[in-house]
Amino acid sequence: MLTGSAPTSKPGIPQDSVAIARAFVHNAKPLLDSLTALHFARIRIGRLQTDLSMRELQRDGLASSFVLAQQQIGNLEMEGIGIRLQLGRIRGKRRINLVEIWLWRLGAAYLVYKKICPSCRP
């Protein structure tokens, strides 16, 4: 049980009021410097947190842009495949048309040849 007697002095702490005032004045400049540094550190932390939140918003915007770009790449790849298939069909038709044109030319040349020389061997 406590009897009400507490230690009245701690080691390293002066007891008289003049010594306390001297210790306060002696520690005032370093304490003010520490508080000033703390104040500016808190201001800088606030600015850095604002910058961090802005960068996070930018990152999220870029991530969504990246996802959209990936989707567009997939759509363009599918469109490219369709265009290549269409190009293959068009090339096939063109080749057939070129063969048909040459056959018409050969037929016309044969008819002209027969008109010019009906008794000549074919």
Image (cartoon, helix red, strand yellow):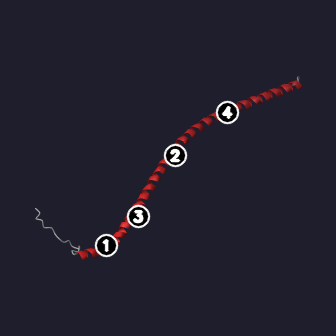
Instruction: Give the label, 2 or 1, closer to the camera.
Output: 1
| First in sequence: mark 4 vs mark 3 | 3
- For mark 4, what is the residue? 90
Report how far apart the C-alphas of labels 1 and 4 lie in the structure.
91 Å
Q: Residue at x 38, y 64 (%)?
A: 39
Q: Are marks 2 and 1 in contact (CB under 8 Å)?
A: no
Instruction: Give the label, 1 or 4, closer to the camera.
Output: 1
Q: Looking at the image, which is closer to me, 119 or 95?
A: 95
Q: Position of residue 60 (x, y in %)?
A: 47, 48
Report how far apart the C-alphas of labels 1 and 3 lie in the structure.
20 Å
Q: Residues within 10 Å of mark 1 (few under 14, many from 20)?
A: few
Q: Position of residue 112 (x, y in %)?
A: 85, 26
Amino acid on which the number 1 mark rests in the picture:
Asn
Residue 34 figure quarter: bottom left
Q: Position of residue 12 (x, y in %)?
A: 23, 74
Q: Residue at x 42, y 56 (%)?
A: 49
The disc at residue 65 is 2
Residue 64, relative to residue 52: is it above or below?
Answer: above
| First in sequence: mark 3 vs mark 2 | 3
Residue 94 figure quarter: top right
Report how far apart the C-alphas of labels 3 and 2 lie in the structure.
37 Å
- For mark 3, what is the residue? 40
Amino acid on which the number 4 mark rests in the picture:
Ile
Q: Residue at x 83, y 26 (%)?
A: 110
Instruction: Give the label, 2 or 4, closer to the camera.
Output: 2
- For mark 1, what is the residue? 27
Q: Residues within 10 Å of mark 4 (few under 14, many from 20)?
A: few
Amino acid on which the number 3 mark rests in the picture:
Phe
Report how far apart the C-alphas of labels 2 and 1 lie in the structure.
56 Å
